Image (cartoon, helix red, strand yellow):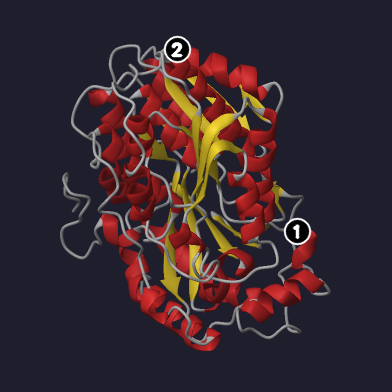
Amino acid sequence: MRSTRGGAVTGTGLAGERIVAADSTARVLVAVTARALAGADCADLGHPWALTRLRGAPEAVRRAAVARAAARVALRPEQVDRVDADVVAQWLVGQYPERSYPGVVLGSPHGAAAHLAVALGVPWLPAAFEVTAHWPHGAVHDPVAALAHGAPLAARLRSTNPDVHVRQVHCPASRGVLAGTTVSFGVRWQRLPEAYARFLTERLAPGAPLLLLRDARTWPVLDSAAGHSFQAGSPGSGLDPVDFHPDSRTLRQVLRSAGAETDRWETPAVSCAPGYAEHAVEPGFELSLRDWAHRGGRPLHRVLFGDPDALSAATADLYRRWLRRAGKTGDRCVVECGRLLDPWQVVRAGLVPYWCENATRRSVAGAEWWLAGSDPFSSVDVLPEPPGMQSPALAGLPQWLAVASFGRRRRALDRTCARGFPVNAVPTRRATEVLRAQPCDLPVPPPMRVTDALAALRDSGTRRSLLVC
């Protein structure tokens, strides 16, 4: 029997906080958005397994420690039966302050989505959540074995949650040694969860609009079974599908960095043409959301992006316009990365936020191109999140310094993030510590209207791979 508060289940169920992967982007984005809407920063958000005491330790020792730390927070196989997606939905909406909202942002995880939601004064809700489960005797270099271990776990998860699709991702380039100790599942709702529908019904003002963000990136996918699919590699790795071919020199570098064998990689045969990647929104989720909105007479708008840089750039442009219309300069920028963001401190200081999905060369180059094409900023602060591992796709510190160099008077690359980059660990609250030092630019502008936000996104999206409809 499910409880109605706190995201827990009576009996043998797991709490929502225990189910959702501790280091998942969606979890962090809900946390930072909820805090910003409550007028709080992210000083209490740490790192799921901070291992700063191992800075400078031999690589093999550090990898083993990271694997043990991740295994402690992953679900045991027998706990997968106790995952309840409805409980997760209740836990997510329960983090937001109890008041009426003028709208809501839903969909794919993206740091700009959190900033957009805060500018609108509305919650952000993910269309999926991530679960990690133990993989005893796993191997980074063996995606076939990962699929063999993950398939029955996915089937057990779906037996108690028939309205979800489970996307298993085996990506040594983005997960490193963790790809050999745990299996990663993206659990995507195929309909609007009851807790979401109840939250929207009770908390949205009459006629409040809904904004659905969809990540439209594609990747080779294997449909393993009904409701379960598998992909080797990920667009978030900064690599291309061809880089995960057994003969790829880049793949050998990735496997070597994770301490894995470099000559035994074999991927399951792809069953179809490239499908949407792991952060996509299920068609059933969108259809049920559309039906709910239609019944309530609420407008539903969609924003599709084939490149996360497009949404980051459009949202940064939107913030600059929003700040200037409120009489502020909009001339100070912060470039965030991964989990290093704090929307409340951004708003308090009147900053323009640009979010990099990760620390890859491709993602950082997107920030460089946007800064190069924008009106100059008087200051640029850069917060590069160290991924905790080596990868040939990562940007080096010189490229991060090049991003900071776009500041006319202030050019700041956070030294704590840079120290030991890319293998050290930096908690989310580091972004708060850095941004707290920024001077205030109060009062905060009044919340932006959804119609104005859509117009700004359309203006910016015409120059980028962003579709607003």
Which residue extends farthest front?
A: 409
- Counting from the top left corner in percent of width and height, residue 466 is at 65, 28
Under mark 2, the amino acid is Arg
Q: Nearer the viewer, residue 78 or 92?
A: 92
Measured along the vertical axis of the image, is residue 163 above or below residue 285? below
Q: Nearer the viewer, residue 210 or 376?
A: 376
Secondary structure beneath dot 1 equals: helix
Res. 160 image quadrant: bottom left
Under mark 1, the amino acid is Pro
Secondary structure beneath dot 2 equals: helix
- Counting from the top left corner in percent of width and height, residue 174 is at 59, 64
- In the rendered image, is residue 277 in sight? no
Q: Nearer the viewer, mark 1 or mark 2?
A: 2
Judge from the rendering whether residue 442 lies leftward or rightward of residue 232; answer left or right.
left
Res. 238 image quadrant: bottom right
* Res 241 label: 1
Q: Are marks 1 and 2 in contact (CB under 8 Å)?
A: no
What is the distance, in whole Å, between disc 1 and disc 2 at their CAs?
43 Å
Decide: few, some or many residues near mark 1? Use Cα within 10 Å; few <14, some 14-19, many ≥20. some
Which residue appears at 38% of the width and 74% of the height?
52
Judge from the rendering whether residue 231 lies leftward or rightward of residue 190; answer left or right.
right
Q: Which residue is mark 2?
A: 325
Which residue appears at 39% of the width and 50% of the height?
431
Which residue appears at 75% of the width and 56% of the height?
240
- Counting from the top left corner in percent of width and height, residue 257 is at 64, 78
- In the rendered image, is residue 463 in sight? yes
Measured along the vertical axis of the image, is residue 390 above or below residue 431? below
Q: Nearer the viewer, residue 358 or 105?
A: 358
